[in-house]
Amino acid sequence: PATVWTSDGTGTYELSELDDDEVRQDRGTSIKIFLDSDYWHLLSEPKIEEILTKYSNFVQFPILLNGKRVNTVQAVWGMDPKEVEYETYSEFYKYIAQAVDEPLDILHFRADAPLEVQALLFIPSFHSEKYGMDRMQPGVSLYSRKVLIESKCPD
């Protein structure tokens, strides 16, 4: 039998068995969230998909929203640089930067001591502001265990 973990957010929780008439996946975790009416605008499927895609798009296990997989992109920075082909870098660059050009240069770096660091930096081949497009926000995105921690970090 499945176990239900319930918490009201005050620091305590309860464990109970899942009723047979409850809806659940064959395996994995089902999450039910109860929100105050002030936050109901967050419950639309497009908004939930936007949040999941922004923060958890590179998580290695599948995240399903109403039966559709939301996270479909592999975290290229976590791969061995010796095994990544240029086309994989190019597709990832176009996805992450919403670009149509090829990157001018790519820096894929890994280090293990004293802490594990995996970095992937793309240098764009042209300056989009030069062609009248919107001003770009400089910075890099910081991920921890493939979950977005900070987007466009200026430091």
Image: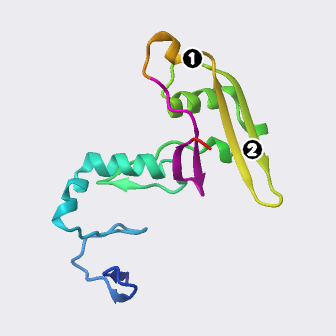
At a point 57% along the width and 33% down the height, the residue shown is 92
Q: Amino acid at mark 1?
A: His
Locate residue 155: give its quadrant. Answer: top right
The residue indicated by pointer 1 is: 127
Q: Nearer the viewer, mark 1 or mark 2?
A: 1
Q: Residue furthest toward the top?
A: 131
- Residue 74 magenta-drawn? no
Q: Mark 1 and 2 residues: CB-CB less than 8 Å, in contact? A: no
Label 2: element kind = loop
Dot 1, how many residues are within 10 Å of its Cα: few (below 14), some (14-19), or many (20+)? few
At a point 29% along the width and 54% down the height, the residue shown is 66
Label 1: element kind = loop
Question: Residue 105, position in %: x, y?
Answer: 71, 24
Q: Amino acid at mark 2?
A: Asp
The residue indicated by pointer 2 is: 80
Question: Residue 28, position in %: x, y?
Answer: 43, 68
Residues under labels 1 and 2: Cα distance?
29 Å
Magenta stretch mostly in which secondary structure? strand
Question: Residue 32, position in %: x, y?
Answer: 29, 69
Dot 2, how many residues are within 10 Å of its Cα: few (below 14), some (14-19), or many (20+)? few
